[in-house]
Image (tube, rainbow, N blue to C red):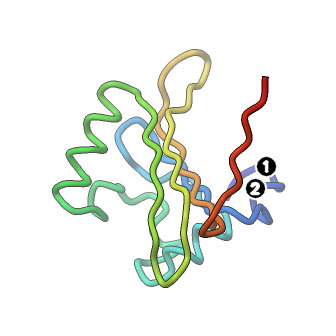
Amino acid sequence: MSEHTWVQGFPAAITVCDAQGVILEMNEAAIEVFREDGGEKLLGSNLFDCHSERSRRILDEMMANQRTNVYTIEKNGRKKLIYQSPWYKDGQYAGFVELSLVIPAEVPHFLRD
C-alpha cells in the first residue's frame, strides 16, 4: 500500500507499476476494480500477464517510448477516463501510473484563455 494515505480514499482507481510492468501499488479503488482478477493479490504480479496480446503491444510501446496513453471506455453502463503516464524517480524512468476515473456520459468542455 502507498505511504501517501490520501490516495487510499481517492475516488479513482490508481495502479502503479515499475519499468518492467510489475504492479507496485494499488489504492482501495483499484483493488475493488480488479477484485475479480485478484484484487490486492495482483501486487507483485506483472501487468503484462493481465492483458491481451493487443494490449501488451500497446503497453510495450508505451514503456519503450515513455509516452502517455489516454482514452475512454464504457463498461457496465459507466464511462471511464483511463490515463496512463510514465513516472520518474530521481529523474529516471521508473514505470507507469494508471488512473481510472468514472466520468459522466457527457462532460462539459470549456475553452479558457
Q: Amino acid at mark 2?
A: Val
Q: Residue furthest left?
A: 53
User: Residue 66, how many percent across, how many down?
Assistant: 40, 27
In the figure, 63 relative to 35: above or below? above
Secondary structure at numbered mark 2: helix
Residue drawn where x is 59% and y is 77% of the image:
32
Q: Would you name the residue on which mark 2 appears? A: 7
Residue 76 badge: none
In the figure, 8 relative to 84: above or below? below
Give the quarter of the image for residue 37: bottom left
Task: Quadrant for the C terminus, please.
Answer: top right
Secondary structure at numbered mark 1: loop
User: Residue 14, how many percent across, how many down?
Assistant: 61, 56
| Along the viewing direction, whichever of 70 and 41 lies nearer the viewer | 70
Residue drawn where x is 49% and y is 30% of the image:
94
Residue drawn where x is 19% and y is 54% of the image:
54
Q: Residues within 10 Å of mark 2 (few under 14, many from 20)?
A: some
User: Residue 64, how many percent across, how many down?
Assistant: 29, 28
The CA distance from mark 2 to mark 1 is 6 Å
Q: Would you name the residue on which mark 1 appears? A: 4
Image side of residue 27 versus residue 79, left or right: right
| Along the viewing direction, whichever of 57 and 37 lies nearer the viewer | 57
Give the quarter of the image for residue 5: bottom right
| Closer to viewer: mark 2 or mark 1 | 2
Image side of residue 108 versus residue 15, left or right: right
Q: Residues within 10 Å of mark 1 (few under 14, many from 20)?
A: few
In the figure, 36 relative to 61: above or below? below
User: Residue 19, how many percent across, how many down?
Assistant: 40, 35
Task: Quadrant for the N terminus, please.
Answer: bottom right
- C-beta proximity under 8 Å, tags 2 and 1: yes
For the image, the number of numbered tags is 2
